[in-house]
Amino acid sequence: MTLTPQATEPPPAASCNPNPLGSRPADHVPVSAPPDPETDSADPWLDVAFVRAANQPIAHARRLRWSVLARRLGAIQVGIKEGAAWLPAAIAPGARRAERVESISALVLDVEAHTRLDRATGVKTVVGPEPPSVEAMVAELALQGWRAILHTSYAHLDPRVQPGDRVHPRYRLVLALSRPLQPVELRPIGLQVAAWLGLSDCLDAACLEPARLYYLPRCPLERREAFCHHVLAGEPLPVEVVLAESRRITALRMQTAHSEAGRQTTNVIAAFNAAHPIGELLARYGYLPQGAQRWLHPASTSRRPGVRVLPDSRPERVYSSHAQDPLNTGQAHDAFSVYCLLAHGGDITAAVRAAARALGLTTRPQLSVPTPAGTPATTFGQATGGESGDVLDKAALRRQAQQALAPETPLSIDYPLDALGSLADACRALVAGLQVRPALAGQALLATAALLAQSLANVRTLESIKPLSLYLLTISESGDGKSAVDSVAQTAIQAWQRAAAQAYRAELETTAQSTTAVPPREPYRIARDGTVEGLRRSFLQGLPSQGVFTAEAAALLAGYGMSRDNRTKTAATFNGLWDDGEISVARGTVGRIQLYDRRLSLHWMLQPEAAQDTLLDPLLVSIGFWPRFLLAWPEPAIPRRAQPWRADRDSAIGDYWRACQRLLERPLSEDCGGLPVLEPTAEASQLGGEFFERLEHLAKGRGARLRDIKPFAVRLTEQAFRLGAVLAVFEQPQTTRLEVEALRRGIALANYALETWHGVFGERDVQDARAGALKLYAWLLEQPGARAHERSMLRIGPKALRTEARRDTALATLEQARLVYRDGAHWGVITQIREASIPV
């Protein structure tokens, strides 16, 4: 079996191209053209017709290669369901009527549960069995050995369908045929194949009409990532065999007045569920019965039965709430699902094959297939060509490779705690009281200090006057104290914000009763999360100095604003606020927003696993987004002692809170324009100049040590000036000078961040080796069996690796990370998913 990833070819716009598949003379010929004399049995021609909309006549008729159709059905278009559609039929342009259909070139099955529509509410409720999951159907088709295309349809995983505690798979199957069908043959063949696949109760029978049209793949924006597309290699459906079997079963039904039970009317999963009571399966794997409907997981320490049988479920299903139970996936499980998880670790393909062998369903009945003269006879169910293999979770494997090849954590860099100046005592108190690393505490205190200082002053750097805003990023493992540190560091601000919010609501109620009163501005200084649009609105209606501080930045980085389609826009907005505090937007939906002199500080804290996707994004580095951040990546915390500590009774923390309160009491203007400027002293200017020139040589000179992190190094002097000014203003709010000692502390903190970034991105040769290894790994995943010969890598592998030296470096890197195995001159992907790479 061969799986293709979701197509990346953009679907052509139907409005500007009358042919939904575009004009590709090399790929298709008119219906009237003679058959290709050199027919490729693995990539046959199909008669296909197209309409621009459901109520339109046939616009075009073409002969397409199977591979072209498969590629087009993998190109998803986001939008409404209605639009261009296709028919697997030989029909001339004109009216779309069944009597005009000459033949059917492929069998198409629309798979969906039957539903009941509540016309009062518009809610659909499932009233029949749900179809097998996409993964289960792919495994079933692979077991049959049929050539097929599967893609999800518009209603796939629609959350509005009830009941809401279940997933609702919806998809379309396109099966190749050994010969075109006469229109009268379509329905019996479709019903028989649906019965073999266990889809009789979840088939849209209207799809078995000769002139039925099928929309080209579409989905709503919110379910774009749920679209699935699989292309399976195999043999075309033997039409004569299927028709003969359909006639035999029809005759038996007429004789016995009931449908024949057994292999002809069920698939592997349904047969397994029918043959295995779920209670027997649970007992086989050590679960202990606790009454008639509850079971206890064998590793449970609570001794409370957390596995329960759901009443009135057909087939019978169980739900587990045990923390350590493999069945605790948030979904209910039938007998086959229990078997798949417990016996095969969730590998649905292996489970289907093992279940088929155990049930004696590995092959179809040996029915002879009519073959052309001179062709060796085959039997239905025997593979005669194509690749066969397991269904790989390529996304999980790629994620696993990225984690395995991620830069090592820079653990050996000492945090310059003394450089924090007046914040140093509070940092030591947090380190001792919460038993956290100094870098974690220092970043939280610096972020709060920057938020308070940025509305009071600017600083003159070597180049120009700059804000005191700081962007800080802290990477720390779960349980190392991120939330606890953040809470203490922000206590004074949060208390002020709560009081201000109460006063704001009271004033809002007062102004609402007046037609002339101006509504007050929002008083909020800190947000836990923030999109670009939300920040613009907050600055428009609220204070000119704000911050986004969160100990769970993984949710922010995984959100809409930092998705791959929106990262550039989000990063550009943050870059502009860091540079000069300007917001400038002109759009038809919101009109013109033009704000000057706003101040934003960020402190994002997240776990290492959550950082990989965006942290190593070369785009975010090249446009200067991450180079504006001061990074800390401390060692994991040591095991903590059980010791009581109260921040409100620590004198150093009390002094810090009082300093925050004094700065909070200073009034804010409408914007941060006209702020006093901290002018560096002559000694500070000289020190800053020397630091700048040293960085220029380290980043740009011959054999430059910092060449690999040049975008970070060239901004470091400005970061040092900002840091020094923040510490100076926090200690003495009235100061107008940046002393050399304050700048020296800023340089120490900036150097720590730069060395940490250097540890993340590593030396260029190491970085290149990782990048090459990931390219080769991605290429291997797409090869038959996820393996390839060494010579093939040089001939058709990634272009950047078509030398022996680069290829061998990439292979050695992958082998060292235990991502590939070697079999003589062949290399293959290790397909086992390690537990650590499974997202939670």
Image (tube, rainbow, N blue to C red):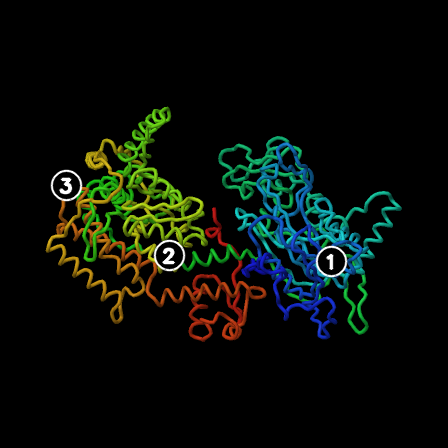
Q: Position of residue 377 (x, y in %)?
A: 79, 68
Image coords of residue 599 (percent x, y): 28, 45
- Amino acid at the residue labelled 2: Leu
Disc 1 and disc 3 in contact, CB within 8 angstroms? no
Reading the image, the residue beneath label 2 is 620
Number of the label disc, if any, that sits on residue 700: none
- What is the CA distance from the residue labelled 2 to the residue labelled 1? 52 Å
**Relative to residue 140, is residue 44 depicted above or below?**
below
Q: Position of residue 134 (x, y in %)?
A: 62, 51
Q: Position of residue 57 (x, y in %)?
A: 71, 55
Mark 3: amino acid: Gln
How packed mark 2 is, by other alpha carbons closer than 10 Å (few <14, some 14-19, many 20 or more), is some
Q: Residues within 10 Å of mark 3 (few under 14, many from 20)?
A: few
Distance between the alpha carbons at the discs numbered 3 and 2: 37 Å
Mark 1 vs mark 3, foreground winner is 1
Disc 3, SS: loop
Secondary structure under tag 2 reads helix
Secondary structure, mark 1, is: loop
Q: Which residue is mark 1?
A: 94
Q: Decide if residue 676 is on the left or right side of residue 348.
A: left
User: Closer to the camera, 287 or 81?
Assistant: 81
At label 1, counting other C-alpha atoms closer than 10 Å, the crowd grade (few under 14, some 14-19, many 20 or more) is some
Q: Quadrant of residue 130?
A: top right
Residue at figure coordinates x 57%, y 57% from the top left: 13
Q: Nearer the viewer, residue 345 or 611?
A: 611
Please identify the quarter of the rendering in which residue 277 is found.
top right
Give the mark nearer the N terminus: 1 vs 3: 1
Nearer to me, 292 or 94: 94
The correct choice, above or below, for 673 with respect to 32 in the image is above
Q: CA distance from mark 1 to mark 3?
A: 83 Å
For the residues labelled 3 and 2, say whether their Cβ atoms are less than 8 Å apart. no
Residue picked out by circle 3:
734
